[in-house]
Amino acid sequence: AEVRALGSDGLAITADVSDPAQVESLVEAVIAKFGKVDILVNNAGTTRDNLIIRMKPEDFDAVIETNLRSAWLCCKAAIGVMMRKRYGRIINVSSVSGVVGQAGQTNYSASKAGMIGLTKSLAREYANRGITVNAVAPGFVLTDLTKDLPEDLVKQLNAVIPVGRWGTVEEVAKAVAFFATKESAYITGQVLNVDGGMAM
């Protein structure tokens, strides 16, 4: 309804993007409705934080599967369609954790660093096909999941952010939206840190 209110059209689909068959069906549904896939934003994510000595192999695998394998599957499915039009914008949502690492997040940091490697490799593979691939790496962002954190923890985390505050969902969305535009056509293989200066 919100998309239609803006004068556009949308299609809401529930899918497990770590399942190749569901990803293929998702892309087919988009093509059936819109005739093309010109923008892909990979933003699926999960965490199962723990120190490595306490982390179970299945917790490592689950985070890699959701955060990294799903992005690979979606890129694989979408790029073939984009190549036929010789146009595409792929934006992978990584994290400051993938840039600098975070204690207690070996699985999450590895998955998000992997997204950066995926971004750069695909950018090299498809730059001459009119497809750009970039990443946005958010830092600490105010969301429904983080709004109820203890005040002392928020203050502690603010101390490591040079601008002294958390980012907003809108700030991250604007960075993603820029990479989706025609104005970003000469930018590919890049990582834009939206983190208040944490990864300088």
Image: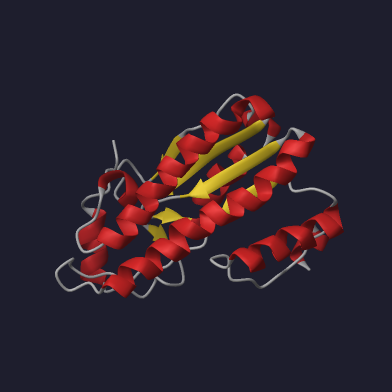
Q: Position of residue 162 (x, y in %)?
A: 27, 43
**Residue 64 visible in the displayed image:** yes
Residue at 31 percent across and 52 percent down: it is 97
Q: Does residue 17 appear to the left or right of 30 in the view shown?
A: left
Q: Does any portion of residue 165 appear in the rendered image?
A: no
Residue 45 higher or lower than 94, as above or below? below
Q: 43 or 167, which lies in front?
A: 43
The front one of 156 and 28 is 28
Q: Residue at x 33, y 60 (%)?
A: 108
User: Would you say 152 lies left or right of 99 here?
Assistant: left
Give the colour scheme shown.
secondary structure
Q: Is residue 144 left or right of residue 90?
A: left
Q: Position of residue 132 (x, y in %)?
A: 60, 34
In the displayed structure, 105 sits above or below 36; it is below
Relative image position of residue 172 (x, y in whole percent): 50, 50
> Exactly how many numbered labels are in the figure?
0
Quadrant showing the N terminus: bottom right
Question: Residue, x 49% and y 32% (percent of image)?
Answer: 189
Quadrant assignment for the C terminus: top left
**Location of residue 24 with respect to 198 vertically, above or below:** below
Percent across and percent down for residue 118 are: 46, 43
Q: Residue furthest front?
A: 21
Please identify the quarter of the rendering in which residue 163 is found: top left
In the image, residue 88 sits, relative to residue 45, either above or below, namely above
